[in-house]
Amino acid sequence: MRLCFHPEYEFGVHVGPPFRWFAWRPVRLWYGRWAWLRFVMCQRVRNRPGLDRPDFAFWSFSDVYSDDGQTLPSRCCRCGKEKAAP
């Protein structure tokens, strides 16, 4: 089982369940760190219904964790060997 953490946004709600995604392009994780060429969890966020503001939506990205709370290692894209997650 894989766990992930996505923050609760004051003006946004999560749409759908989080899912595992390979970051083939650089993406910024919810806490500001960059992730690239490894698996991350992502979830869609949109504005809360009833707010008097324009509609917006964005993707929230998070690290992938194992049951014991450790970041899961990612695999090297060329050789297939495991490398430690940064």
Image (cartoon, rainbow, N blue to C red):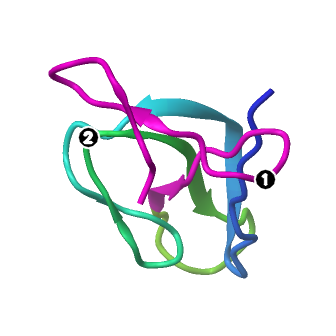
The answer to which quarter of the image holds residue 80 is: top left
Pick whichever, 29 or 78, lies toward us.
78
Count of numbered circles on the image: 2
Residue 44 location in percent, x, y?
A: 55, 47
Most prominent secondary structure in the magenta stretch? loop
The answer to which quarter of the image holds residue 19 is: top right
Q: CA distance from mark 1 to mark 2?
A: 21 Å
User: What is the x, y in percent for residue 2?
Assistant: 74, 34
Q: Amino acid at mark 2?
A: Leu
Q: Is residue 59 magenta?
A: yes
Q: Position of residue 72 (x, y in %)?
A: 59, 41
Residue at horizontal 58 percent and vertical 56 percent from the top: 45
Judge by depth and name the residue closer to the eye, 17 or 31.
31
Quadrant of the image for the C terminus?
A: bottom left
Q: Which residues are magenta?
A: 57-86
**Label placed on residue 69:** 1
Q: Is residue 18 placed above or below 76 in the rendered structure?
A: below
According to the image, label 2 marks what residue?
37
